[in-house]
Image (cartoon, helix red, strand yellow):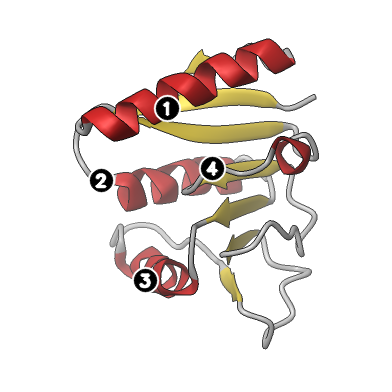
Amino acid sequence: MAEVRFVKLDKAEKALHLCRIADEHFLAGSRILVVVNDENRAVTLDRFMWVWDRGSFLPHSLNNGTVDCMDEPVVISAAEQNPNQAKVLIMGTPCTDEFISRFDLAFDFAETYDKQLAESARVRFRHYRRLGYNPTMY
């Protein structure tokens, strides 16, 4: 069963936090999958990952069906697919319970800067708890 961690966001800086978490786990030797809600966001995040930190290199690939992502340490996807057999899932958008269960570690976001997003995060937190994930704040 996956360990679920929530990242509290007081500002709309999700892309920055996606990159920081991916970088931390890449440096620890993990394979990472970042799931976002559509192709436009996937392309935007792909571009951002090249420039987000001048002192960092985060090797990654965009899972768009035209590139083989099997050997990539970090993959960005707009679909619930795990082409690089990642063990760390970073959810830029909520994923299904069945998909989350395939990972050792999953990150979700509590976007407290927006009341509706914050309430959605609380609902997901309680849902994960009912499923036995025992989510924690990261």
Asked if the residue at tag 3 contacts the one at tag 4, i.e. Cβ–Cβ closer than 8 Å, the answer is: no
Of badges 4 and 2, the one in the foreground is 4
Residue type at the position of mark 4: Pro
Compare marks 1 and 4 and give the one earlier in the sequence: 4
Residue 121: image tag: 1
Q: CA distance from mark 1 to mark 2?
A: 16 Å
Res. 28 image quadrant: top right
Residue type at the position of mark 2: Glu
The residue tagged with tag 1: helix, strand or loop?
helix
**Residue appearing at x 43%, y 19% in the figure:** 122
Number of other residues with Cα within 10 Å of mark 4, as a class: few under 14, some 14 to 19, many 20 or more: some
**Residue appearing at x 25%, y 45% in the figure:** 13
Q: Is residue 92 left or right of residue 75?
A: left
Number of other residues with Cα within 10 Å of mark 1, as a class: few under 14, some 14 to 19, many 20 or more: many
The residue tagged with tag 2: helix, strand or loop?
loop
Asked if the residue at tag 2 contacts the one at tag 1, i.e. Cβ–Cβ closer than 8 Å, the answer is: no
Residue 1 rendering spot, x and y as whole percentages: 80, 24
Q: Is residue 101 left or right of residue 45?
A: right
Of badges 4 and 3, the one in the foreground is 4
Q: CA distance from mark 2 to mark 3?
A: 13 Å
Let me know if residue 138 appears in the view.
no
Number of other residues with Cα within 10 Å of mark 3, as a class: few under 14, some 14 to 19, many 20 or more: few
The residue tagged with tag 4: helix, strand or loop?
loop
Q: Which residue is mark 4?
A: 94
Q: CA distance from mark 4 to mark 3?
A: 18 Å
Residue type at the position of mark 3: Thr
